[in-house]
Image: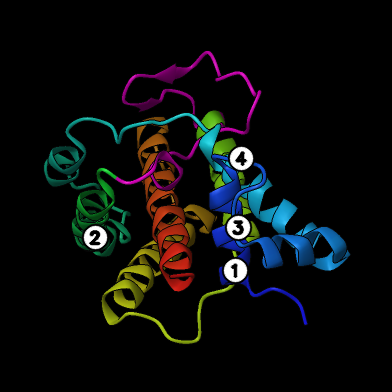
């Protein structure tokens, strides 16, 4: 019988301090089982990848910019998107509050280890849309690499994930509409907003997986 994901996470966390730490019987099984050893290696690599990522903060005056954005004819997406932003910003504030003080694994997401930060990266976000698109792609890869969601979930966490995913769907719909005319500033704002949503979603999903192993 193979070790459970919970046992492997416990062993991984114990061995982060001491390579021979953890339950001796479990450690002996993993040492002799290729499948469990490979899964433990995957979990270790996932943690190290997330630890190595740089941290960014959402751009300043995010909400003020949304509220004060002038209305423009032909932008039928602006009102529903603004409401979506308002709702998901509240979610992201909740996520930030609940993740504050946790291990940096749960609060850092950006480019991959060893990847130099783009020259266009600013203190409060990215100045270049291409950098935002690349970061969005990397976050998507991180989401795909996370373990599947547990069968039993917390209602609050489930609602948070649903809200973030719904907001992401709305942003993606807006960005993918061929007849949507965006200024460079609006395109940057939407891509930055998408990155912030994905950043929060990765954090919530990782935290959920960690709690599921307790």
Q: Looking at the image, tell me whether mark 4 or mark 2 is earlier in sequence order.
A: 4
Which disc number belongs to residue 7? 1
Q: Position of residue 60 (x, y in %)?
A: 21, 30
Residue found farthest to the front:
24
Foreground mark, 2 or 3, reads 3
Q: Looking at the image, tell me whether mark 2 or mark 3 is earlier in sequence order.
A: 3
For the residues bearing labels 3 and 1, Cβ distance under 8 angstroms: yes
Q: In this rendered view, identify the residue nearer to me: 3 or 179.
A: 3
Disc 3 designates what residue? 11
Q: Looking at the image, tell me whether mark 4 or mark 3 is earlier in sequence order.
A: 3
Q: Which residues are magenta?
A: 102-130
The quarter of the rendered structure image containing the N terminus is bottom right
Decide whether the magenta segment is chiefly helix, strand or loop.
loop
Q: In this rendered view, identify the residue nearer to me: 17 or 156.
A: 17
Residue 119 belongs to magenta span: yes
Residue 92 lies left or right of residue 131; in this view the side is left
């Amino acid at each position: 019988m193979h070790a459970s994901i919970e046992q492997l996470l416990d062993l991984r966390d114990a061995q982060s301090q001491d390579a021979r730490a953890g339950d001796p019987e479990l450690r002996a099984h993993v040492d002799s089982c290729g499948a469990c050893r490979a899964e433990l290696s995957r979990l270790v690599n996932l943690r190290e990848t997330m630890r190595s990522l740089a941290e960014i903060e959402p751009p300043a005056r995010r909400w003020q910019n949304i509220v004060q954005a002038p209305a423009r004819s032909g932008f039928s997406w602006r009102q529903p998107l603004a409401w979506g932003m308002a709702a998901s910003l509240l979610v992201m504030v909740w996520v930030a509050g609940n993740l504050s003080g946790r291990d940096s694994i749960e609060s850092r997401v950006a480019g991959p280890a060893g990847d130099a930060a783009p020259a266009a990266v600013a203190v409060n976000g990215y100045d270049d849309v291409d950098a935002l698109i690349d970061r969005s792609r990397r976050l998507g890869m991180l989401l795909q690499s996370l373990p599947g969601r547990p069968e039993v979930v917390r209602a609050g966490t489930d609602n948070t994930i649903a809200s973030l995913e719904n907001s992401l769907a709305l942003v993606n719909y807006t960005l993918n509409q061929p007849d949507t005319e965006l200024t460079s500033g609006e395109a940057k704002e939407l891509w930055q907003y998408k990155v912030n949503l994905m950043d929060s979603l990765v954090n919530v999903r990782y935290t959920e997986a960690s709690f599921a192993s307790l």
